[in-house]
Amino acid sequence: MNRTDAYLRHHYWTDTQLANACGLTLEQLDALLAEDLVPAPSYVVSADGTLHSAAFGEFPQTGATPGRYFHPGTVAWVTRAQEARAQGGAEAARATLEQRFRHGFAAALAGLDRELARLPDSFDDHGTPIAAGLDTRTAGAWDAFRQGIFGLCVADPATEQAIATKEILQEALTTLRERHLRDAPGADIDRTAALALIQRYARAAMPFSPLEYPRSSRKRLVEDFAADLHTGAVPG
C-alpha cells in the first residue's frame, strides 16, 4: 500500500462504506448522487490508478485502489437529502437543500464576521448583511459543496458552521501572510495571535493527501507561515 492509498483508507470511506453507514444500498446512494442531492466524491480513482481530486484535478497512475471516496462527514448530508427527497421530487429537494445550506452558511458567516475576521463584502460595520456580497459567498460555497471540495479540505465537513469556519480562517491567514510577505519581517503582526490562528486553522483543515500537500493551503498557511513567523524571515 502506497502513501496515497493509505491516506484514502485512513480518512475516507468508499461508496459502499458510505452507503452501509447510511443504511442504504449502493443503488440508492447512486440515485441520490445522480439527482445531485449529496456532495460528489472528494476523490475518484480510476481503474489505472489515476486519482481525480475534487480540488486539485488529476494525478496519473498513483497506484491507489480504484473507487469513489467520501469524507465520513458526508453521512449528515445524505441524511438531509433523504429527508428532503421523501417530502417531494428531486427538483424540490435540490431547491430545499440549497436554500438550507446557504442559509446556514450565511448565519455562520455572520458570527465569524463578529468573532474572527471582518467580511466587509458581506456585512457592514454594524453587522447588517450586504445582500450582493453574501449571495456571492453562499453561492460559491454551495457550488464547492456539491463538487465534494469541502469533503477534501475541511476536517469535519458535517455542518455549515465547520465549513465556514475553515474557509474564513483560511481567508484571514492568507491576508495576514500576504501582509507579512509585502512588509518588513514581522511588521505590524502579533506573532502570538498569528500562531494561535494558524493552530486553529490546522485543526479545521484536512491534512491533504501526499500528492496534494505541496500545493495545499495547509502547506502554505501552516507549515510555511509558521516557520516564517518563528524565524522572522520573509520568504523569497
Image (cartoon, helix red, strand yellow):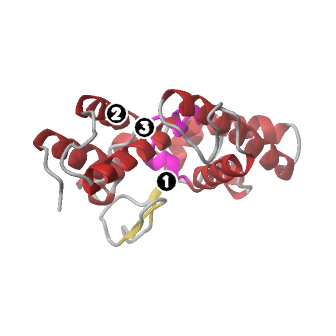
Q: Nearer the viewer, mark 3 or mark 1?
A: 3
Classify mark 2: residues with Cα within 10 Å, few (<14), some (14-19) or many (20+).
some
Going from the N terminus, do you reach mark 2 or mark 3 first?
3
Q: Which mark is residue 197?
A: 2
Q: Does the magenta-highlighted stretch encompass residue 162?
A: yes
Instruction: For residue 232, say whether it is visible.
Output: yes
Classify mark 3: residues with Cα within 10 Å, few (<14), some (14-19) or many (20+).
many
Separation of residues labelled 3 and 1 (CA atoms): 13 Å
Q: Which residue is mark 3?
A: 155
Residue 183 appears at what percent x and percent y? 25, 53
Q: Nearer the viewer, mark 1 or mark 2?
A: 2
Going from the N terminus, do you reach mark 3 or mark 1 first?
1
Q: Is residue 33 left or right of residue 12?
A: right
Q: Secondary structure at mark 1?
A: loop
Q: Which residue is mark 1?
A: 42
Residue 170 appears at what percent x and percent y? 42, 45
For the point 62% across and 53% down, the residue is 146
